[in-house]
Image (cartoon, rainbow, N blue to C red):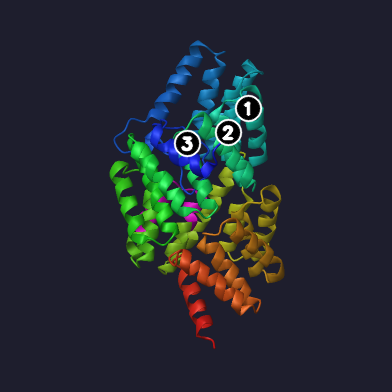
């Protein structure tokens, strides 16, 4: 009988060296995976690998393996550069690989699965990974795609099983990062942290070090450990000064400490260099907090444009659409978009946004089941607990609201520079009642 995930991951990390850059493609975790191009001073190995593949294909246009590798490299380049216009190139290369070899070509299927995950087509990603495993049951990369898809589709047990198989086949950074996130999602933050700490001990490449440090910083942040998060982000930036996720984490710590200028500087740098909808939305929130409403509105416009670009290149993301609608104050549109997303993937993040959108639209009775599901699925998420507490308060359940807001405070009182103080004031008022 196999050992359970919680046992295997801790033992495996100490025994096996980490995989190289690019092994964590498609990772759906709180931070992106490492890539050589984000580390200052390192050669752009991703661009070099694309150029080499293109040269080889000019000489050997029927090399299906190189077509598959090129397609996957484009997927990674799209992630690193925040440029979804590369997705059609990736699709073209991967489909060419299958055109050359239609059967017994798991690499192309894995690549298409990674692309589907990147485009948020999680059901399609699951199907591609399943087909790849039918061709090669020992393909660890196929299990990576499968785990990511199951996670986003809300099938936690299937995601854990896929990660376990990945660990069995090829323990390394790609598997450890997914296992750590799996543990974190289930509320086992201490175990998730221990796993990433052991992964860090085996890391040698600067990008791997930066990635592990960022994961550790995010885990510390998630439990309100500002000093620990700050140390990890600083150590990560020493290893990889250009790794944008570390600046994003440092911005959150600065905002929590009340240093809004420093928070704005880091968030602005991230939004300028990797202009994804979420980085632009986060920057807009800080700008609004600082009173710069006009610039905040401009960032929302850019976030909307980034979202449209993602959709225009084959992406599906009504969750971001709902978040943008909420930022514009359009609760009715947010409900519609979040409901559409929920039908595609019943994931905790979607449940939370749907529940909060329903609340803002005046539909608290419908909101509560979604918010309770979000909290039960991710018990160590302070934002989810805050949303549940505020809706319970609005519904007249003072005792339930007090419990949920206490949960948010105990998990991470700094979870948001805007909502955190609101939660504290609401809880103080509840606790002052006789």
- Residue at the spot 35% in from the left edge and 42% down from the top edge: 210
Image coords of residue 104 (percent x, y) = 64, 18
Q: In this picture, is 282 found above or below 2?
A: below
Query: Is tag 3's residue or tag 2's residue first in the polypeptide sequence?
Result: 2
- The answer to whether residue 233 is above or below residue 240 is below
50 over 255 or under it: above or below: above
Residue 86 or 158: which is nearer the viewer? 158
Q: Which residue is mark 1?
A: 133
Is mark 2 in CB contact (under 8 Å) with mark 1? Answer: yes
Q: Position of residue 46 (x, y in %)?
A: 42, 29
Which label's residue is closer to the chain start, 2 or 1?
Answer: 1
- Location of residue 153 with respect to 252 vertically, above or below: above
The boundaries of the magenta stretch are: 264-281
- Could you say which is closer to the camera, residue 193 or residue 77? 193
Q: Could you say whether the residue bearing mark 2 is in a helix, strand or loop?
A: helix
Identify the residue under disc 2: 143
> Is 282 displayed left or right of 385 in the figure?
left
Asked if the magenta segment contains residue 266, the reply would be: yes
Q: Residue furthest front?
A: 1
User: Callout 2 environment at 10 Å: few (<14), some (14 to 19), or many (20+)?
Assistant: many
- Rendered image: mark on residue 174: 3
Residue 26 screen position, x and y as percent:
53, 38
State the residue at coordinates (69%, 47%). Answer: 344
CB under 8 Å between discs 1 and 3: no
How far across and down, in percent of the image, does residue 401 sit? 58, 74
Q: Residue at x 54, y 50 (%)?
A: 305
Taking the image as shown, residue 55 lies to the left or right of residue 230, namely right
> What quarter of the picture does the N terminus occupy?
top right
């Amino acid at each position: 009988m196999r050992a359970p995930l919680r046992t295997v991951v801790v033992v495996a990390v100490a025994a096996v060296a980490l995989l190289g850059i690019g092994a964590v493609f498609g990772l759906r975790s709180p931070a992106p995976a490492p890539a050589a191009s984000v580390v200052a001073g390192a050669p752009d190995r991703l661009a070099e690998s694309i150029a080499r593949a293109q040269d080889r294909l000019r000489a050997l246009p029927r090399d299906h393996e190189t077509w598959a590798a090129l397609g996957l490299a484009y997927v990674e380049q799209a992630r690193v550069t925040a440029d979804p216009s590369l997705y059609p190139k990736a699709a073209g290369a991967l489909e060419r690989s299958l055109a050359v070899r239609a059967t017994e070509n798991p690499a192309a299927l894995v690549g298409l699965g990674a692309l589907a995950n990147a485009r948020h087509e999680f059901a399609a990603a699951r199907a591609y990974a399943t087909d790849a495993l039918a061709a090669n049951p020992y393909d660890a990369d196929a299990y990576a795609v499968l785990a990511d898809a199951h996670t986003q589709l809300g099938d936690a047990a299937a995601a854990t099983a896929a990660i376990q198989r990945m660990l069995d086949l090829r323990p390394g950074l790609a598997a450890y990062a997914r296992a750590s996130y799996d543990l974190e999602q289930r509320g086992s933050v201490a175990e998730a942290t221990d796993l990433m700490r052991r992964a860090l001990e085996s890391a040698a490449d600067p990008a791997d070090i930066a990635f592990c440090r960022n994961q550790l910083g995010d885990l510390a942040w998630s439990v309100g450990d500002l000093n620990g998060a700050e140390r990890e982000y600083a150590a990560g930036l020493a290893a990889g000064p250009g790794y944008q996720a570390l600046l994003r984490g440092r911005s959150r710590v600065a905002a929590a400490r009340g240093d809004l200028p420093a928070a704005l500087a880091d968030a602005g740098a991230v939004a300028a260099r990797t202009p994804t909808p979420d980085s632009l939305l986060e920057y807009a929130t800080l700008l609004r907090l600082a009173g710069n409403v006009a610039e905040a509105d401009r960032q929302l416009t850019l976030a909307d444009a980034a979202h449209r670009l993602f959709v225009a290149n084959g992406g599906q993301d009504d969750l971001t659409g709902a978040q943008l609608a909420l930022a514009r104050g359009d609760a009715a549109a947010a409900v519609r978009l979040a409901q559409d997303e929920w039908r595609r993937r019943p994931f905790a993040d979607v449940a939370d946004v749907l529940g909060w959108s329903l609340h803002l639209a005046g539909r608290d009775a419908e909101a509560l089941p979604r918010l309770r599901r979000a909290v039960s699925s991710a018990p160590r998420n302070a934002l989810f607990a805050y949303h549940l507490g505020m809706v319970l308060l609005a519904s007249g359940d003072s005792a339930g609201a007090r419990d949920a807001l206490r949960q948010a405070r105990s998990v991470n009182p700094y979870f948001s520079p805007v909502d955190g103080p609101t939660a504290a004031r609401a809880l103080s008022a509840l606790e002052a009642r006789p």
